[in-house]
Image (spheres, rainbow, N blue to C red):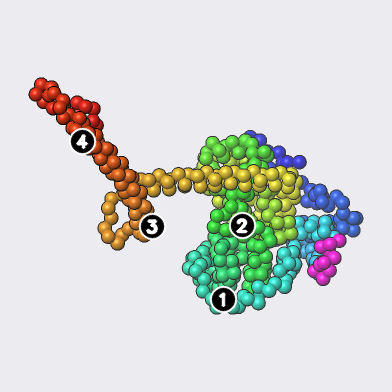
Amino acid sequence: MASPAISPDSSSHEALSSVNSAPACSPTSDSENLSPDELELLAKLEEQNRLLEADSKSMRSMNGSRRNSGSSLVSSSSASSNLSHLEEDTWILWGRIVNEWDEWRKKKEKLLKELIRKGIPHHFRAIVWQLLCSATDMPVKNQYSELLKMSSPCEKLIRRDIARTYPEHEFFKGQDSLGQEVLFNVMKAYSLVDREVGYCQGSAFIVGLLLMQMPEEEAFCVFVRLMQEYRLRELFKPSMAELGLCIYQFEYMLQEQLPELNIHFRSQSFLTSMYASSWFLTLFLTTFPLPVATRVFDIFMYEGPQPCFPLGCGNVLPFNQAELVQLDMEGMSQYFQKVIPHQFDSCPDKLILRAFQVKYNPKKMKRLEKEYAAIKNKEMEEQIEIKVRWENRSRHAMVVTRPRCPQGQVTRAQEAEENYIIKRELAVVKQRCTSATENLQRAQTTIRQLQDQQVGVPKLGGQAPSATTLGCPYQ
């Protein structure tokens, strides 16, 4: 079922606390069909996540009062001991998954999906991401070193932007840092492989995350695969047509699931693209802290861009609806930049669990895609028609009002057009001249005949009749 909208008189903090109080291992629709052994594995992962959170909280509480310090240390020690056993089980499990990858993808797909939603262990992310997108053995990897020797027209733009990519992360700090250098290499190499896209702002955040997990050659191969197979290339094309489609589909979900917030956004002229564009272009990497955003990226690697929709409509906006409806456009813009990014630091599991409780209808999304394509085609036809009309009017105005240009400044096409018009007008004038000459000759013949008939005719009032008196059209 779709996530209900939060009423205006409730607060986002209440919404967050209500979600945090929900059971951590609430099953999703996909986990209901798993076997008891598979459910036990999921329960272990849930317990590990709970202990990790408890361990971090107990470590923070060590700076509290002396009266509670002893119990905090005991709690921390106990949680860490239990955690070490669960970590060992997790390593064994994911090691088996990697070694038996084909079997897991074919026969244990539902369990694999649930495990990925619980989070891929950090040390396994590099290989699992490559396996998920089939980037382990790509021919383009052999071209990487040669691409780095070439020059790209996007180099200056890439250099300018990489300094603003994860500026607070140690790996990317400093102009001469290793992180900035390898990030430049990967972005430059891709701009040479795909010259139509070249380089687009936002893509560096995705590559930066890959470089935190794996060497640059492997990151390059994964990025190429993501661009080709995950529709990211359509997002980063100069026209950004795919981004327009995503915004169109997201607006439909917003109107359907959060109508009150949608009305407020419209009343304040707060466009969806003003806050949601970065969600799709960077896959929430510029919205959430890295630990949370990496969990989202785990899911993206397995399920594609689909989770961006429920994450936005099922989590970010409902949690903040009460505050947003009280703000104007500038206030909402600041709220999205400063408040929302830090709301899910301590509860990534709840964030992801809530997202998959939001109803996502692929058939409806496909219908919206067709609607959007029809709208764009109609706009294109109208633009072409307007362009043709404008060109025709401009051509006519140029012929009628164009001043005589100095020699050498008129193009051959314009001269040919002028010559054609002059020849056509000259032909008309010649035709008129010929017709007038013939009429004149006939008139002169008529006059001579009349003059001959006048011989012996008595004069009228002492004057001979004129050609006008006799009805001759020409004198």
Which of pointers 4 and 2 indicates the residue nearer the eye?
4
The foreground one among 121 and 409 is: 409
Segment tinted magenta in the rendering: 96-107
Q: Position of residue 380 (x, y in %)?
A: 54, 47
Which residue is drawn at the image coordinates 23% and 30% (left, top)? 472
Determine which residue is flagged by label 2.
Answer: 234
Instruction: Check disc 1 and report its element: helix, strand or loop.
Output: helix
Instruction: Check disc 2 and report its element: helix, strand or loop.
Output: helix
Cα distance in 3D space between marks 1 and 2: 25 Å
Whether residue 400 appears in this view of the structure is no
Determine which residue is flagged by label 4.
Answer: 448
Which of pointers 4 and 3 indicates the residue nearer the eye?
4
Q: Position of residue 265 (x, y in %)?
A: 56, 39
Determine which residue is flagged by label 3.
Answer: 413
Crowd class of label 2 (few under 14; some 14 to 19; many from 20; radius 10 Å): some
Answer with left or right where residue 307 lies relative to residue 390. Answer: right
Q: Position of residue 277 (x, y in %)?
A: 58, 51
Q: Give the total of numbered labels.
A: 4
Instruction: Check disc 3 and report its element: helix, strand or loop.
Output: helix
Answer with left or right where residue 296 lies relative to residue 439. Answer: right
